[in-house]
Amino acid sequence: MRATLRRLGDVIPLPVSVRPDPAANFLVSPTVSVSTDPAAADIADQLAELLRQATGHPVPVTGTGGSVEIVLGGYDKSEAYRIDIAAGGVTLRAGGNEGLFAAVQTLRQLLPVAEADEVTLPGGTIEDEPRFAYRGTMLDLARHFFTPDEIKSYVDLIVQFKINHLHLHLTDDQGWRLEIPGWPRLTEVGGGAGTGVGGVGGGFLTAAEYTDLVAYAGQRFVTIVPEIDLPGHVNAAQVAYPELTCDGEPVSPRTDAEVGYSSLCANRDETYAFVEDVIRTVAALTPGPFLHIGGDEAFSTPPEDYRRFLARVLPMPGKYGKRTVGWHEMAAVDLPPGAVAQYWRIEPADDGVARAADRGHQVIMSPADRSYLDMKYDKDSPLGLDWAGVVGVQRSYDWDPADRLPGVGEESLLGVEAPLWSETLRSPADIQFLAFPRLCAIAEIGWTPRAARNWPSFRERLATFGPRWTAQGINFHRSAEVDWLD
Ligand code: TNX
């Protein structure tokens, strides 16, 4: 069977430069092989495997002379790459493996959606590099726990769209999902059966599982950003250790979806001994540069206590070699050097974030009315919340992070992130339904030059992913905003 030829530009995120040359199409013959610099052997293996899946050909990996060639060098920026497709062969070029990995994700999208014995790649040249260094998504493991294998499967999906940070919301009122040696009850109690919203699910990552997950993500150039949400969202920790409340009285487990009722006690030394132990542990387990300390919705922490708490806790990640990240409420105080504020609200301006940006801090843009994957697509969505409104596919695409907040322009942005809170999630299929296709919109906003992207083009390219996702078994949302190809 002959597969339908993809167009060189049918790629998400849209590359910086696409120059098709229809006279230069490359027929992937049965004798195709991949040759590589030994330093890129892993990437060559991945590419060969994708070519095998697409064609059924053997696709050996060799040192030289392959019709598909992987070349290191010529680019300084870590994610920049170039792909040349000509009748005589294909070349993927980048300065290092991260750029080559990005090139392979692009090439993968140029392969047919399902195996065929006659596969042709569209001729021409793609040159590419990202707009922002940080293109993220967040998974809330606290409201509903997902197993290491389920999280790895999500990593496998997000890398296809060049998402390179996975923020894990590890703790909240309902559950505590990361083992902290020395504080065993956090996960024995806080990660027990029935600790998800609605009493559904439960579980936690052992330190070893977390380490393995971080390594798995790292092999795919995804940085894990762990979040310990403080000083609010701590009911699960207080159930496990009643001494973490102000009066030392036990509190009850909660599996409802209320927020803002729990708080650590800002004027007790025990609080800071606990927090520092946790931050030191998480920092030691995490090779990436970021440690997220939450800071959101601390409605039951009096403002002066909130400031006192932050004054002591904001510097802690730095003490253990990490950059502090926090939800933007923390920008109410002066932040330590290198700290990053993550904007999540729906208001059109925020004085604290503008002030932080003015003082040189970087910002991650995650406005809930555009980038929250847990908002319903429309009023009939079977999953999701609607406190920030409904967020259709065009709404998730048609905005720009550099325009979102006065005083927070392009130069202040570290990037964008699409959080997925899990109050209404129960399964990996639920993750897929809310993330696809909207995560692709956020991925393109984070990668593609602003002037190069527009909704009609995105919509048309997105339509071509319907059959691919169907073939991959992905439970995507067939939004009526897109004329999906069959
Ligand atoms: C707000 S966004 C929260 C979370 C909820 C989410 C639901 C943020 C920093 N806090 O506690 O899960 O809304 O959309």
Image (cartoon, helix red, strand yellow):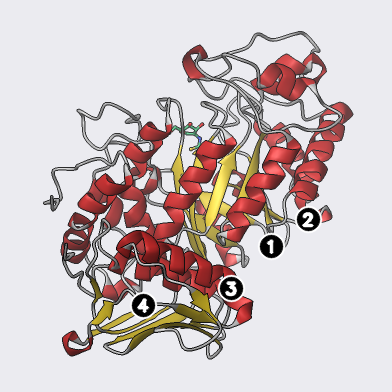
Percent from the top left, x then y, of residue 55? 31, 64
Q: Earlier in the sequence, mark 3 or mark 2?
A: 3
63 or 136: nearer the viewer = 63
136 or 362: nearer the viewer = 136
Q: Are marks 2 and 1 in contact (CB under 8 Å)?
A: yes
Q: Tell me the SS state at disc 4.
A: loop
Q: Mark 3 points at which residue?
A: 41
Residue type of the residue flagged with mark 1: Gly
Q: Residue at x 77, y 49 (%)?
A: 283
Q: Mark 4 points at which residue?
A: 31
Q: Name the residue under label 1.
A: 338
Marks 2/4: CA distance? 53 Å
Q: Mark 2 points at which residue?
A: 318
Residue type of the residue flagged with mark 3: Ala
Q: Which residue is drawn at 65% across and 33% down?
A: 303
Q: Tell me the SS state at disc 2.
A: helix
Q: Which of marks 2 and 4 is in front?
A: 4
Residue type of the residue flagged with mark 2: Gly
Q: Tell me the SS state at disc 3.
A: helix
Percent from the top left, x then y, of residue 330? 62, 45
4 above or below 452?
above
Q: Nearer the viewer, mark 3 or mark 2?
A: 3
Specify few, some or many for label 4: CA neighbours under 10 Å numbering under 14, 14-19, or 20 or more: few
Q: Is mark 4 within 8 Å of ligand 1?
A: no
Q: Which residue is drawn at 63% across and 11% down?
A: 253
Marks 1/4: CA distance? 51 Å
Q: Tell me the SS state at disc 1.
A: loop
